[in-house]
Image (cartoon, rainbow, N blue to C red):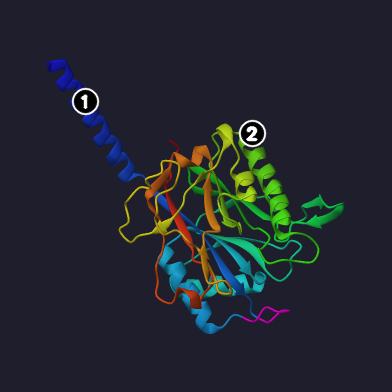
Amino acid sequence: MIRKALGLISCALILCVAARLAEGAEAFRIATYNLNNYLLHASGSRPAKSDASKAKIRESVAALKADVLAVQEIGGAEALAELRTLLGLDGLSYPYWEHITAHDTEIQVAVLSRFPIIARNPHTNDSFLLYGRRFRAGRGFAEVQIQVNSNYVFSLITTHLKSRLPVPAADEADLREQEAILLHEKIDRILKNNPDANLVVLGDLNDTKSSVALRTIIGKGSRMLIDARPAERNGDDQWHPHAGYDPPKITWTHYYGKEDTYSRIDYILLSPGMVKEWNREDTFIPTLPNWGIGSDHRPIAATFWAENR
């Protein structure tokens, strides 16, 4: 009886120490945000971004308090430079950045970081065969390695897969699936070399979780990615009565005005190694009034402890 009591006390002490260590560990936050045509000048059917829209984007970014921010639909290096400058005036400094231009020369993907980017592996010329024709991945894949502190490094891949708008050349879902295959190959390369690698895959994947494209990216088995599934902080805490379904929290990230629909198509996906440092309680979608002035997407964020566990 005494041994059992001592055992319980020991377990409680261990849990207490672990909790304190977690509280004392350095935390950092990663986010992704589709900026909805952040262009300085009109291009084709895409208008220049209004000042009101830019201001709302900065308000949204401020609400994220992200240390690393992946963005989609940035209209070139000049637009990214403006965004960085304006965020800096708001007290949000991102001294390190990566921007890539692939087949789509109007809108691209980029990464802003408070931490040093110590390696870059841009993928701007990937292609695939479909229906006997060769297609190129429209926005490419920005792959970087980021040093949070002397002991913690993680890799990040961001992309913006083919939109759900139809195109004459091919079925949009088939194009997206092929881009997803290319992305999965890059994920698999990293995790084959190091199954414990800290890897985050995030961005506008333009499809739902049950789609072929998402299932391809997430993968299977020991290298399967975990969906961080950020949600609104509105007090919801119920679980779905069906064990196989996610909790009914509000997780939509995109509003499609033509159909008046809300869907979740922006994701933060984590490798098994990165999941160990993930702070589930601080993973969220910020809720702001008139958020749609900035973009038709809402940003999402996840927080991590900067120590390998």
Q: Is residue 45 magenta?
A: yes
Taking the spot 71% from the left edge, 60% from the top edge, the residue there is 172
Residue 10 numbered mark, or none? 1
- In the image, residue 102 sits, relative to residue 240, either above or below, namely below
The magenta segment: 41-48
Of residues 229 and 18, the one nearer the viewer is 229
Of residues 302 and 21, the one nearer the viewer is 302
- In the image, residue 36 sits, relative to residue 209, either above or below, namely below
Taking the spot 32% from the left edge, 45% from the top edge, the residue there is 24
- Mark 1, Cα crowd under 10 Å, few <14 / some 14-19 / many 20+, is few
User: Which percent across, then down, holds residue 6?
Assistant: 16, 21
User: Which percent across, then down, holds residue 2?
Assistant: 12, 17
Residue 170 shows in this picture: yes
Q: Secondary structure at mark 1?
A: helix
Q: Amino acid at mark 1?
A: Ser
Find the distance from the CA under tag 2 to the CA under tag 1. Answer: 39 Å
Labels 2 and 1: the sequence-earlier one: 1
Taking the spot 48% from the left edge, 78% from the top edge, the residue there is 55
Of residues 167 and 117, the one nearer the viewer is 167
Q: Secondary structure at mark 2?
A: helix
Residue 151 shows in this picture: no
Count of residue discs: 2
Residue to which mark 2 is pinned: 192
- In the image, residue 261 sits, relative to residue 132, either above or below, namely below
Q: Is residue 273 magenta?
A: no
Image quadrant occupied by the C terminus: top left
